[in-house]
Amino acid sequence: MNCLWCDEEITSDVTWSNVALPTKAKSLCEGCEKELTVLNGSRCLRCSRVSEEKICKDCKWWEHYMGGEDVLTANYSVFAYNERMQDMIAKWKYRGDYQIGFAFQGRFTQLFKKQFNDIKNIVAVPIPLSKERMNERRFNQAEMLAHFLPIEVDSVLDRVHGEKQSKKNRYQRLSSENPFKLQKAINKPVILVDDIYTTGTTLRHAARLLQQHGCPITYAYTLIRG
């Protein structure tokens, strides 16, 4: 198999263990995989931001803004947003290279099993695109990520078309109106799935709407912590 990013052939040593117990083929070569930064070390327990504080100042602000209790129990992210990731996201998300998404499948599934395995009856809800944005991009990257997970996926959110989040500054994101509509209530724990956590506004809009209609608890699971 060739690397999904640089197209170099991926080779692996043949050993008795991988002959007897074959593993899923790698989708990135060793060199490209090393250029991605997997998050580790001290992080905010709420949003996965690199921080020495248990709850970072941004999440404390959200608690205050929401009257003392954040609607988002926790966000877990797999990768940091570095130069290589920026290039890969641009090709996958904005230039429509669907196959690039499979480069993230292994790590995305691996961390999910570590963080969420003990939560029963949990449902993955991908953050949707508006119809206009879907026509532009041809696929929803959050939905692709959600379907990597070994749990039920339910696309219950619709999105009203508006300016791209990437075009907004921090204040505009934080003060934006809720762009989501709910097709039906979910009375189970929910994991909101998206490609990137930046300010957390989008995810909290979705979490608040779900909880207003009976969802008991909402987590977020994102590929990247911006």
Image: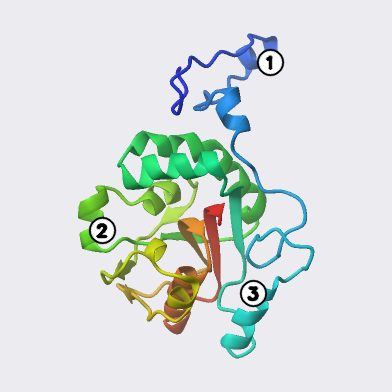
- Pick the residue in front: 88 or 72: 88
Separation of disc 3 and disc 2 at Cα? 29 Å
Residue denoted by label 1? 17
Residue denoted by label 3? 59
Is residue 124 shown above or below 162?
above
Chain-order first, disc 3 or disc 2: 3
Q: Give, as a three-letter code, the residue at label 3.
A: Cys
User: What is the quadrant of residue 162 in the picture?
Assistant: bottom left
Instruction: Give the residue displayed 74% in from the left and 62% down from the top.
Output: 51
Residue 220 coordinates in the image, percent (x, y): 54, 63
Chain-order first, disc 1 or disc 3: 1
Is residue 47 shown above or below 143?
below
Residue 104 coordinates in the image, percent (x, y): 50, 39
- Pick the residue in front: 98 or 207: 98
Instruction: Give the residue displayed 33% in from the left and 37% down from the top.
Output: 97
Separation of disc 1 and disc 2 at Cα? 46 Å
**Picture quarter with the C terminus:** bottom right
Q: Give, as a three-letter code, the residue at label 1.
A: Ser
Label 1: few (<14), some (14–19) or many (≥20) C-alpha neighbours in 10 Å: few
Residue denoted by label 2? 133
